[in-house]
């Protein structure tokens, strides 16, 4: 799904990629593809929030940002810039008849946002500024991931990461 998007990924392809037997996937996801996608998006949200929180254990929002950017850099390079963000794919592709998928994406972004806000607040940034900086960070990194895929280069993410570091450092000063 990170490579082909929501519409471009079938249950059959998920089975092939995972090596799971057909019967087991329907056992674990009796509601079908949408249930699988929803759970995958929620897991991605939890993992991203945990990554940000772990990166800021010493109360350093810049370290949290670096961890988030490094994770994306490694994922992009490992996939030869083919795999993007599952959460973004679902947020942009889920239809009006799939509100649970849109909600799962919103909840995942909210988990990342909350982790960044908490980290910035711990660094002494005001609540309103923390909220805005967290929104800017997520939007900029997600946009950079899209640019990296299009350009087949990690440069957009490096550029965005460097500018976000400067922005966060100025907010912490």
Image (cartoon, grey):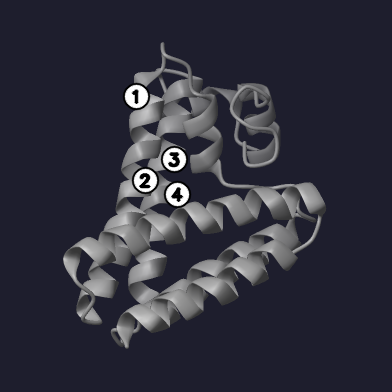
Residue 84 spot, x, y in % from top left: 64, 47
Kindly indicate whether the residue at mark 3 contacts the one at mark 2 (C-beta within 8 angstroms). yes
Indicate which label's residue lies in the foreground, 2 or 3.
2
Dot placed on the residue nearer the N-terminal end, 2 or 4: 4
Residue 57 visible at all: no
State the CA–CA distance, disc 2 to disc 3: 7 Å
Tag 4 residue: 44
Residue found at the far top of this picture? 97
Task: Decide if residue 83 is on the left or right side of residue 57.
Answer: right
Q: Residue at x 74, y 67 (%)?
A: 155
Tag 2 residue: 108
Residue found at the far left of this picture? 127
Task: Decide if residue 66 is on the left or right side of residue 101.
Answer: right
Identify which residue, 113 or 26, lies in the foreground: 113
Dot placed on the residue nearer the N-terminal end, 4 or 1: 4
Vertical order, 52 against 172 (above or below): above
Dot placed on the residue nearer the N-terminal end, 3 or 1: 3
State the CA–CA distance, disc 2 to disc 4: 7 Å
- Label tally: 4
Q: Secondary structure at mark 1?
A: helix
Kindly indicate whether the residue at mark 4 contacts the one at mark 3 (C-beta within 8 angstroms). yes
Task: Decide if residue 32 is on the left or right side of residue 78.
Answer: left
Quadrant including the C terminus:
bottom left
Vertical order, 120 against 96 (above or below): below
Vertical order, 146 against 7 (above or below): below
Tag 3 residue: 41
Kindly indicate whether the residue at mark 4 contacts the one at mark 2 (C-beta within 8 angstroms). yes
Quadrant including the N terminus:
top right
Residue 43 spot, x, y in % from top left: 40, 47
């Amino acid at each position: 799904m990170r490579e082909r998007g929501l519409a471009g990924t079938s249950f059959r392809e998920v089975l092939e990629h995972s090596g799971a037997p057909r019967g087991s996937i329907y056992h674990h996801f009796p509601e079908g593809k949408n249930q699988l996608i929803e759970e995958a998006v929620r897991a991605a949200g939890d993992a991203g929030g945990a990554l940000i929180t772990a990166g800021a254990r010493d109360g350093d929002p810049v370290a949290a940002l670096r961890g988030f950017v490094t994770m994306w850099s490694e994922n992009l390079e490992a996939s030869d810039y083919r795999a993007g963000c599952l959460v973004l794919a679902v947020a942009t592709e889920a239809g009006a008849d799939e509100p649970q998928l849109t909600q799962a994406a919103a909840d995942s972004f909210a988990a990342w946002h909350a982790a960044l806000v908490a980290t910035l607040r711990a660094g002494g940034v005001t609540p309103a500024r923390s909220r805005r900086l967290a929104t800017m960070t997520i939007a900029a990194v997600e946009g950079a991931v899209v640019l990296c895929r299009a350009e087949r280069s990690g440069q957009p993410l490096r550029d965005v990461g460097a500018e976000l570091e400067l922005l966060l450092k100025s907010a912490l000063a």
